[in-house]
Amino acid sequence: MDLFEAAGPDPKAPRPLADRLRPQTLAEVAGQEHLTGPDGALTRLLRTRSLGSLVFWGPPGTGKTTVARLLAGETDLAFEQVSAIFTGVADLKKVFEQARGRRVQGRGTLLFVDEIHRFNRSQQDAFLPVVEDGTVTLVGATTENPSFELNAALLSRARVLTFRSLDDDALEKLLARAEALEAKALPLDADARLALVRMADGDGRAILTLAEEVWRAAAAGEVFDTAGLSEIVQRRAPIYDKAQEGHYNLISALHKTVRGSDPDAALYYLARMLDAGENPLFIARRVVRMAVEDIGLADPQALVVANAAKDAYDFLGSPEGELALANAVIYVATAPKSNAAYTAWKAALSLAKERGSLTPPKTILNAPTKLMKSEGYGDGYRYDHDEPDAFSGQDYWPDALGRQSFYRPVERGFEREISKRMEWWAKLRRERGG
């Protein structure tokens, strides 16, 4: 779900303020002028009347659903919306069939997929044929980095557009529109109004929901200060304050303090994010990343601890599960550090992309047919378990490449032991002419 979601089926039913203020044109969308302004990316696309498939990436409450609806209207496409949380492949197939039926009648379909990152890889693959043949114009919305969460094949067929958190000016404009619609001012003093903006943390839907709470709570002639506001909404201004020290800055600070082996600073940034309402599972995923990027095999247990903390939070919820995240952060911050595996992987991937068509040596290829056996497949292969020290020392590299070296373990933690093993194997390899 996103900012300014559609009203229910009964037009006479009470409608939330956010719904009543839902923009009717792209120009009314707050805070996304880089997309919807006169020279915005979406405005330019609309001039061509051809959208292509899109991925909207950005925080909640920034207008992703609203913009998708408006695009469908501007291009005369039928609007279909599904959520990855509640939709399976069978449901998608029904939507695709309906889109094919419309296409036969000469009308296209804009399929909006909320939280598209929650579809697994095989589910994402289901979109490829209908995107490829134009059955649907896909618009996916995600709060997660598409580079990590979406299939490369799907990404290659879509343009990623970034939605920004609403800044203070955009949130103020929303409040002004709300006051104009309600024909009354918010009963807040100047400091409380600033606090309300901070509480919304860049989320347009949130600030309108908070404004409604304030109006409901105010008696005739009553004006709230900051303390009164916090009491009403049971929320205080988040630590992601107007100094713009937000979501990405604080997760970066946490990552760097872990990398710098400072558990106290790491706990401080963890506490700031949790206290401000950050999604704990987002933090848990980043701690897993820290374990594999900055610790790696210097302490293989770090990944186990990080994953266990993620599962523990999933099981316990808040606030009990937050202690599991704190344990994991302390563990990874105090663990021995090594980016040797990370560096080795990047080097191997780079070489694979550059020279990935080379054939492995025939000695290590199986020979399931007589022809392949006659061609020398598998000839000369030495089964390591039958060799002295369970090590043959043979060369496994394509002839055109020769032996390469990517992984260089550090002299810290468990990688010191790995380094000893690799030195021993290198010595045996030299002795045995491998």
Image (spheres, grey):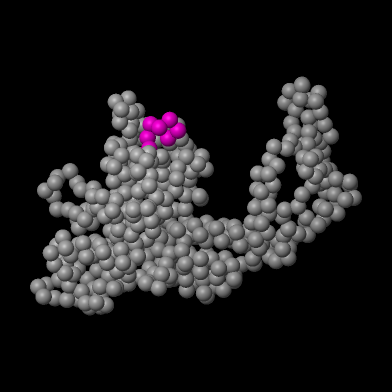
Residue 159 position, x and y percent, is: 45, 45
Q: Residue at x 39, y 50 (%)?
A: 41
Residue at image position (47%, 67%) is: 249
- Number of on-image labels: 0
Q: Residue at 16% x, 60% y: name it.
A: 181
Q: Is residue 95 magenta?
A: no
Examine the rendered structure and indicate whether residue 116 appears above or below residue 285.
above
Task: Name the image quarter holding the C terminus.
Answer: top right
State the extent of the magenta-drawn residues as a range: 131-137
Q: Is residue 35 visible?
A: no
In the image, taking residue 62 as reference, residue 218 lies left or right, namely left
Residue 193 in view: yes
- 427 or 134: nearer the viewer: 134
Q: Is residue 135 magenta?
A: yes
Give how far across and how far down residue 5 sits, in percent. 26, 50
**Percent coordinates x, y for residue 3 in the rendering:** 29, 54
The residue closer to the viewer here, 74 or 420, is: 74
Q: Quadrant of residue 381?
A: top right
